[in-house]
Image (cartoon, grey):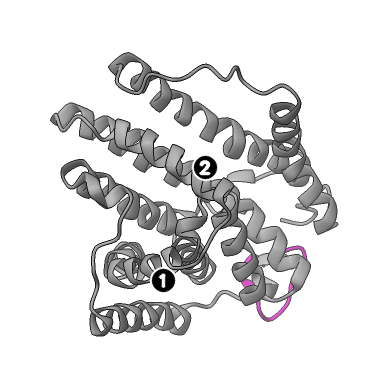
């Protein structure tokens, strides 16, 4: 493990991670795609959009993380990105259970979010995205639902977790020297970069929950599983109840409170059972009482 970093400055690491996405966004701003109207009634067009979305997830999230890991770490790149066993086996199941139990509270936050007045430009952007998602979920054939689970559920769960939790959260926690602050900032950016502000609060809450699950489990697999379960459940639900694309189910206040309490209980259990410390994650080159396992 000694000398595992090529680039020790977290600011330089952050610059490397964000350089490629910033270049892509800037290029899109200067050379926007043709403004031809897309026929969302054409199944071939919709299929093309699905795979384009999958491709963009890899380009925007996986490729920058790969470049970051190559330039930052001298070896064991997958390990340092979080691809390792969780501290306890039951953390995988509890992570999936956590996001399922969070659904009522997330829906409640969605209702609150929709009461916030947004600029017309943001609302227009949201409506455009909702129209595309409705087209994605229009067919309810089993094969189409399966494709949606893979393209909209599994791929984003892997790609986004690799970028946001595996790389960005790691950097931000080191920058702030405070796990909670780093997790909160990552959750905020996780929600903001989706550019869907009518769902900002529930997505940020989910991002924070995933961040805590990752930090205390020490494994990216726990949050990939949790993220996938969240996405897949929504894909299946919206496939058969399309109005959930634009609206949240009515959630009683007591159900939302019970949901939030259940999520807090699982996160508390994670913290209690975890031995993860700042030193174990960021001081692996030093043999100290908190990372003596390296010896």
Give the image location of residue 100, x and y in percent: 27, 64
How many labels were placed on the picture? 2
Magenta stretch prevailing secondary structure? loop
Residue 211 versus residue 37 in the image, above or below: below
Residue 208 versus residue 67 in the image, above or below: below
202 and 158: which one is in front? 202
70 and 110: which one is in front? 110
Which region shows up in magenta? 284-295
Q: Mark on residue 182?
A: none
SS class, disc 2: helix
Residue 42 versus residue 55 in the image, above or below: above
Q: Is residue 35 left or right of residue 269?
A: right
Q: Farthest residue to the front: give it.
A: 120
Q: Mark on residue 112?
A: 1
Q: Tell me if I can see residue 294 in this picture.
A: yes
Which residue matches tag 2?
Answer: 125
SS class, disc 1: helix
Q: Tell me if I can see residue 291 in this picture.
A: no
């Amino acid at each position: 493990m000694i000398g595992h970093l090529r680039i020790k400055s977290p600011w330089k690491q952050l610059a490397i991670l964000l350089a490629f996405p910033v270049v892509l966004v800037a290029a899109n701003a200067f050379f926007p795609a043709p403004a031809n109207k897309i026929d969302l009634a054409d199944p071939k067009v919709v299929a093309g959009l699905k795979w384009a979305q999958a491709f963009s997830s890899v380009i925007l999230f996986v490729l920058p993380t790969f470049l970051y890991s190559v330039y930052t770490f001298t070896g064991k790149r997958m390990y340092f990105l979080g691809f390792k066993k969780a501290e306890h086996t039951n953390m995988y199941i509890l992570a999936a259970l956590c996001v399922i139990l969070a659904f009522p509270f997330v829906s409640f936050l969605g209702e609150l979010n929709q009461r916030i007045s947004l600029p017309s430009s943001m609302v227009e952007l949201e409506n455009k995205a909702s129209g595309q998602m409705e087209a994605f979920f229009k067919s309810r054939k089993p094969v189409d639902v399966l494709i949606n689970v893979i393209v909209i559920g599994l791929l984003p769960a892997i790609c986004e977790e690799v970028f946001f939790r595996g790389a960005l959260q790691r950097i931000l926690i080191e920058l702030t020297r405070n796990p909670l602050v780093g997790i909160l900032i990552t959750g905020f950016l996780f929600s903001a970069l989706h550019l869907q502000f009518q769902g900002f609060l529930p997505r940020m809450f989910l991002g924070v929950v995933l961040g805590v699950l990752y930090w205390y489990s020490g494994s990216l697999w726990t949050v990939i599983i949790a993220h996938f379960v969240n996405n897949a459940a929504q894909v299946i639900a919206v496939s058969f109840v399309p109005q959930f694309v634009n609206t949240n189910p009515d959630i009683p206040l007591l159900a939302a409170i019970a949901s939030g309490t259940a999520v807090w209980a699982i996160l508390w259990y994670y913290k209690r059972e975890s031995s993860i410390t700042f030193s174990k994650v960021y001081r692996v080159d030093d043999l100290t009482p908190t990372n003596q396992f390296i010896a």
